[in-house]
Image (cartoon, coloured by chain):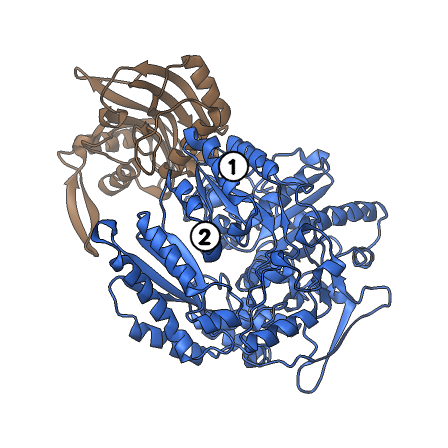
Amino acid sequence: MISMEILDDILLKVEKPARYIGNEQNSIVKDLNKVDTRFAFAFPDIYEIGMSHLGLHILYNLLNKENDIYCERVFAPWIDMEDLMRKNNIPLYSLETKTPLYEFDFIGFTLQYEMSYTNILNMLDLANIPVLSKNRKEHHPFIIAGGPCAYNPEPLWDIIDFFVIGEGEKSTLEILKLYREWKKENKNKEDFLDRVSKLEGIYVPSLYDVSYKTDNTIEYMEPKKETYPKKIKKVIIKDLDDIYYPEKMIVPYIETVHDRVVLEVFRGCTKGCRFCQAGMIYRPVRERSFNNLVELAKKLVEVTGYDEISISSLSTGDYSQLDRLVKTLMEEFKDKNVALSLPSLRLDTFSLEVIEEIQKIRKSGLTFAPEAGSQRLRDVINKGINEDDLIRSVKDAFGLGWSTVKLYFMIGLPTENKDDVMGIKDLAYKVKDVFFNLPKEKQKGNLKITASSSCFVPKPFTPFQWFGQNSVEEFYEKIHMLKNNIKDRKITYNYHDPKLSYLEAVIARGDRRISKAVYKAWENGCRFDGWAELFDYDKWIESFKQADIDPEFYAVRQRDYDEILPWDFIDVGVTKEYLIKENEKAMNEELTKDCRLGCTNCGISTTFTGGVCK
Amino acid sequence: MIKIRGKFIKEKHLKYIGHLDMMRLFDRAFRRSNIPISYSQGFNPQPKISFATALPLGVESYGEYFDVELKEKMDIIKFINALNNQLPDCIKILKAVYVEDKKSIMALIKWSTYIAEVKLINKMSKQELVKQIDYFMNLEEILITKEKQKKGRTKKTRIDIRELIKKLDILDYDDKKIIFKTTLKTGSEGNLKPTVLINSIDEYTNIKLNKDSIKIQRLELFIENDGNIIPPI
């Protein structure tokens, strides 16, 4: 254990030392003599980001409910802390008991975004644990990973011992149960990997072989033994009300990204936007019941003392009882000054009534995500919103006194042309006109419109998984076009760095060979790649060269339908046939309806039951 | 107006929590405790809690103060217990009283007493240390350079801090370290941080100090009453 005296010598020299001390309200303290399995939940980014992640709170409390398991937390130390830790030979430690990570049984990383991968390598290294799986010995912990990016696990195949595909609440307990049995038998790690590979949703990459064709595409991928599963099926929880939801949440001392109670109203999404990975991999939609949510909200406010509840999901406006939930919660908490926020409201479900309820307490800026500038392109991506919806919503909002509007777009979507790009500008100007066409006395506040564009990154398990991403140059052309044309002091145009999106695309659809580039990049000093101030594109390009990899092959190459994709061995329930059909419809600008209105045959209901697909 | 003035300690790892984060911590602790505190009016209602003075990051304190307004009166012992139940182990309410005082605690504070432990670079005899401190305290003026950011430029001004030091004693020392006890001006009429004092001792005397390893504790805050210096409650 690392003593507080040692830490006292360095903590005052770093920015935000409270990131590294633990001991927060509702964090869990256990007697180490009474636990037999120690699990470190590792988030490969800084504390403030990791602590805002709902999955952490769920898994942390779920595992700690078991008397003989102790789950602790660890985050990536910021560079100032890393520097001092290395200088003073302090290994990466858990926040709860300040135990070096190499003493744990498991280190479980959550993969939320590709650009956090180098941090995983760096955290292992900081913990004095060999970065590559094959170099780790019997006494080292198992390094495991889950989360949305684990749906294409291959870019980390030689770092992570095994991956958990799907919703970790179920698998993790099963893994730990198996682990305890295995530990009693005194067998080696290889034996454990063999056994764990038979659990549903577990992928052990070292048990599989991949071979490539001369054109660099995959020839085959197969298990080394007959007994290993050929397909890895994701694990889901059928009924959200049955599944554990924490009645306690750790309350950080310092301000985090989401510093509030998070209430998960449902999982999955029925909209079927064709660019969206979450909308495909988290199917089927499963709602938590109204009564359950109200009870949870009360308990969570009571144990945290937070002054805000965020009603969260992929598309909160779709929650079947949203109006009732909002009204009930507002009434419940009005004396305690607890505000509500609805971060994922969509235009088409944007209800005036809901906004008015929320407005009674606090007024923040409004955010809309039309995603594409033209109706044609919105149809391609199946974002079932039309301009009239947007204009009406914006008009209502202005009428109610809002004056700050943010509009989110993507550039580089499939079939995009110049008119589509300029549509972003047009829409922003139309929103401005809505404001100034209101009668003078209704124009409240100082109008501020922000239009932001991110660069589209094609993701596995979406209808656009075959699409060749725009090149960095194409992205810049489009950005310049918008920059040069949006000239209005009421409208600000922001854009994301295309270079970052390019790398994201390489890794997101990478195969096993990408792992080498990630390793090289880390060796060359890359970490916190998602942070603009530390992102070093040239170092990455150099790393690809050293790993003998052509990043263009992964980012901008259009794939054929019959190509074996690196993630094809994972079964998310949504079939490849459905994805192909959706991609074809996209090219024909055809819409697919919300599947709450009738099944669209994505395949999920044949393999998984639960939620709206019963 | 129903107002309670409370005294609390903040120690151990909680010294790494800055002033703003501590204010949020109290806000949440009050909400969990169900103590009926008052909120300001408007779109973004804020709890009516005010703290005497900001404690620098890394400093432990055994005498911090706050004022809080309540919607209705409650038993003071119940108030203390309810709040302590919701505060982390290293923050503890020691004492609380109802006050009629219209003035906020912030405006009342004039002095702080600190203990500062610093590593010595050179070994010195006690006699010599005392002589050096006497010399320091007898200086007519002690000038320090204060840097201020103004329109992106750094503006340097020299200010005299002698009047801001009321007392400076050597509490203990050995070959490696020295422990000072000092009373320094605090609040809106003038404020001196103990780290600035340590730097000045290093600059103006022969006592050479390792400024990277200063451990500071605040012992008490003081108000002035008819020329007397007394604790706020």
Disc 1 is attached to a residue of which chain? A
The type of residue carrying mark 2 is: Phe
Q: Work out whether residue A186 or residue B168 is closer to the camera in this orientation and state it.
A: A186
Instruction: Tell me the tag on residue A249.
Output: none
What's the residue at 58%, 63% (across, down)? A593
Of tags 2 and 1, the one toward the viewer is 2
Q: Is residue A477 left or right of residue A565?
A: left
Q: Position of residue A462 (x, y in %)?
A: 61, 68
Chain A's colour is blue
Q: Earlier in the sequence, mark 2 or mark 1?
A: 1
Task: Name the tint of chain B in the rendering.
Answer: brown
Residue pointed to by mark 1: A24
Q: Quarter of the image holding residue A122?
A: bottom right
> In the image as oriented, which residue stretches furthest toward the left?
B140
Viewer-closest of B176 and A280: A280
Q: Amino acid at mark 1?
A: Glu
- Percent x, y of residue A297: 54, 36
